[in-house]
């Protein structure tokens, strides 16, 4: 009895279809790799960058609403009429939706902290041999933290009338608060608005949330005819003290145009404006316990 054993290695009828299937899979995997490693990161980076710019504009809307509420209260006080508080609402996008299947969403955290960013403004002077001091305080901040994976992680902050953009390698006041310095008739006029925020909350996600604001109280205080020994101190403790230092220093420098001395170290920075051998103002910041404290004093 003869048994024939077939040599499968010599049978090449299925080779072409197998190679074709493998090549098709390789082409598909190559195309998928290009999408995952090239297209998706670029898409998400652009989306996250666009979201940060949008959030900056939305925080500018929050600032505008609060400023208009204070302006309406001031107008009512000047007209001697009763002020009717109006509630405003601004939509803020927390995060960015991801690419289905390929990338997960990038959530953001919106937090309102009434105790953050404490400001203290003190007017210290001596009148007829008696020391006087008038002190005002304010605090509160709205912070959007975006832990971007493809774009630079950033925060957008509303603090005392200013909108700040913060990231690990820099921070700047992008929308200026109400702070003006004017020299007129051989006198110095300084105006500064203090904004206290009440209410507390935190939310995380990629949804759109509403930030509502309503003015509870408005108090304008004017101080004039200060003696020559009067000193104005402004102290501020915040994670964004460096940006406030730059803003105050630039504003005073642009208006008064005084020379002075500048010192800088790894944890502090100070500029002292001097004229006629006398200190006119001093602006500085100091890093303490991971927070930056800004101080501004003028005579």
Image (cartoon, rainbow, N blue to C red):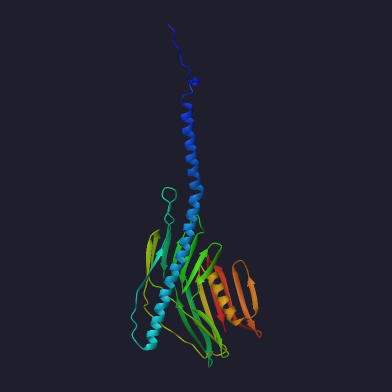
The residue shown at (49%, 37%) is 26
Q: Is residue 262 above or below residue 98?
A: below
The residue shown at (55%, 65%) is 170
Let me know if residue 136 appears in the view.
Answer: yes
Spot the residue most to the top: 1
The quadrant in which the C terminus is found is bottom right
The quadrant in which the N terminus is found is top left
Left/right of residue 10 with respect to residue 89 in the rendered view? right
The residue shown at (49%, 50%) is 39
Q: Position of residue 211 (x, y in %)?
A: 38, 68
Q: Quadrant of residue 286?
A: bottom right
Q: Position of residue 29 (x, y in %)?
A: 48, 40
In-front residue for pair 217/128: 217
Q: Position of residue 212 (x, y in %)?
A: 37, 70
Let me know if residue 140 appears in the view.
Answer: no
Left/right of residue 279 with respect to residue 175 in the rendered view? right
Spot the residue most to the bottom: 128
Q: Quadrant of residue 281?
A: bottom right
Q: Is residue 221 above or below residue 144?
A: below
Q: Is residue 265 above or below residue 69?
A: above
Q: Position of residue 50 (x, y in %)?
A: 47, 61
């Amino acid at each position: 009895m003869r048994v024939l054993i077939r040599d499968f290695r010599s049978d090449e009828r299925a080779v072409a279809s197998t190679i074709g299937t493998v090549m098709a899979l390789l082409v598909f995997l190559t195309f998928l790799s290009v999408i995952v490693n090239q297209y998706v990161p670029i898409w998400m980076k652009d989306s996250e960058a666009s979201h940060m710019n949008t959030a900056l504009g939305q925080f500018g809307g929050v600032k505008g609403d609060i400023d208009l509420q204070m302006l309406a209260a001031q107008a009512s006080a000047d007209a001697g009429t009763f002020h009717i508080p109006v509630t405003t609402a601004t939509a803020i996008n927390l995060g960015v939706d991801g690419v289905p299947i390929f990338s997960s969403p990038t959530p953001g955290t919106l937090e309102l902290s009434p105790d953050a960013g404490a400001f203290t403004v003190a007017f210290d002077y001596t009148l007829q041999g008696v020391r006087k001091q008038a002190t005002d305080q304010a605090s509160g901040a709205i912070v959007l933290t975006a832990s971007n994976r493809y774009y630079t992680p950033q925060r957008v902050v509303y603090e005392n009338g200013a909108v700040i953009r913060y990231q690990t390698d820099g921070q700047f006041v992008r929308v200026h608060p109400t702070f003006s310095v004017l020299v007129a008739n051989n006198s110095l006029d300084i105006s500064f608005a203090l904004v206290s925020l009440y209410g507390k909350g935190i939310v995380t996600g990629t949804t759109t949330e509403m930030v509502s604001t309503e003015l509870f109280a408005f108090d304008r205080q004017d101080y004039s005819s200060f003696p020559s020994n009067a000193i104005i101190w402004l102290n501020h403790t915040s994670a964004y003290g460096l940006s406030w230092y730059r803003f105050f220093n630039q504003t005073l420098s642009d208006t008064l145009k005084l020379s002075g001395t500048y010192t800088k170290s790894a944890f502090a920075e100070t500029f002292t404006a001097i004229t006629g051998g006398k200190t006119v103002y001093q602006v500085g910041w100091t890093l303490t316990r991971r927070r930056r404290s800004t101080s501004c004093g003028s005579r």
